[in-house]
Image: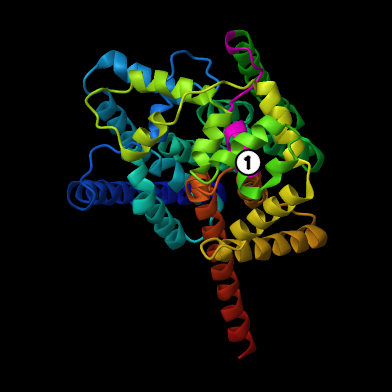
Amino acid sequence: MKLKNNWLSSKSSKNIDFFILGGILLFCLVYRIVYFGFINNDTLHYSFDSITYFTSSIFDLYRTPVYPLIIKLFESISKDNFLYYLVYFQQFLSFLSIIPVFYLLRNTLKNRGIIIITTLVYACIPHLIDLNICILTECLSIVGSTFILFLFSYYIKKPQKSIAFCLGFFPFILIMLKPAYLIMLCLMFLFFTGRFIFCKNEKRILHWGMIGLFIAILGVWGYCEMNKRTNGEFTLTKVSLFNSLENTVISGAYKYGGDEELISLIDSTKQEHIVITASLLNNEWIDYYKIQNEKFPKNLIRTSNIEFCLNIPDTENYSYARLNRFVKESQHTKLYFEYISMRLIKIFLSYKLLPLSFIILFELIMMLLLFLKHKKILWMLSFCILFIIGQLITIAIGGLDDWRRLILPTYPFIILVFSLFIDMIWSCRKKLIEVIYDYD
């Protein structure tokens, strides 16, 4: 009889969730129609970075293949309007991602009200849904982040071989979309290893996760190898070199790079514009950019930043080995270390990220106390915090000053960290009221 009551209760709860999700989807559909119809009625947004996804082959030195392949797919459907179809596709995927976000929160949080509010926040933030009309990877990256979080929450709730395999393999798809997800391979390895140690009953299931992870690592290595055979360099992307060149110039550490010709070039051009300086050093990028510009739709007006990049002089191309050696010499200096340290401090203590930093610190202390007292690990929260910190460190070390854009793929993780914090505080409040009531 008790089992029957539990089953009925579970079925009732699922029905309630189904109707709540239906209401959320209906509200968000109307909201987005109104938003894009009257508030932000742009149909398409692109920038100088958008051109770089119009690559000529699968293996490219500057862009991983998922987004360029999606562009080519829609281009094969319609030569004239394929970018608009791409935007509709992004709008559709972004809307569908509300479903895994809801169930992710349902699997993680306790309070149904917080689940509903957090889902609406994710679905309605203008800063996020504006990305749906951008010819950039950020929209699909956010969708990918929500999906891997959903897989993670599902595995925590109900470990299965198929979910473990997908959890191990899916980082490969994300990396091929945006190399910033490379840290996900390390996090998945830590997760599976941790579960091997603390959840011994899952060992047979976790083997499938490790198999998926091994295939993902093999896939990344294979892509780099094919890039070497196609383009002559074993690399996932050369964007990091371009960023590093800019940072060495900004920091002043380039003076210790040990290459007088390159130092002289920087000294003579850095007052004009940092991007021009970095481009003249890594002028191969200009060659690529002009080829990609030819593939960009001719009917779209070139923005000012696109014109700026196209007007950078096309000069001698220095070899990758030489530039890489110059960057390494510059980075192994006290000046560069101080520069990166200040970037880390500025990012973590930025007025926009300061609340997040305090919440993460609070949650880390709570998790440590929970582990020391009860030997319990909050896997979901740990995963989110490690990914956020890893991304911020990566941005500080290898990114540029446009960190507000670079941090976008972590938004679902950040939203979950905030909602878990509120959920914890709300639960404590309820218990405190109960204690006060009993005391009275």
Q: Residue furthest bottom?
A: 440
Residue under numbered circle 1: 398
Residue at 68%, 52% (x, y): give it: 339
Q: In the image, is residue 242 part of the stretch drawn in magenta? A: yes
Q: Is residue 14 above or below residue 242?
A: below
Residue at 39%, 56% (x, y): give it: 121
Magenta span = 230-248
**Which image quarter: residue 81?**
top left
**Rendered location of residue 270, percent (x, y):** 55, 43
Give the number of callouts. 1
Q: Can residue 4 be seen at all in this image of the molecule?
A: no
**Which image quarter: residue 257?**
top right
Q: In the image, is residue 400 part of the stretch drawn in magenta? A: no
| Residue 418 located left or right of residue 195 | left
- The secondary element bearing badge 1 is classed as helix
As rendered, which of 248 and 280 lies closer to the eye? Answer: 280
| Residue 81 located left or right of residue 55 | left
How many neighbours does mark 1 have within 10 angstroms: few (below 14), some (14-19), or many (20 or more)?
A: some
**Rendered location of residue 244, percent (x, y):** 63, 38
Q: Can residue 88 be seen at all in this image of the molecule?
A: yes
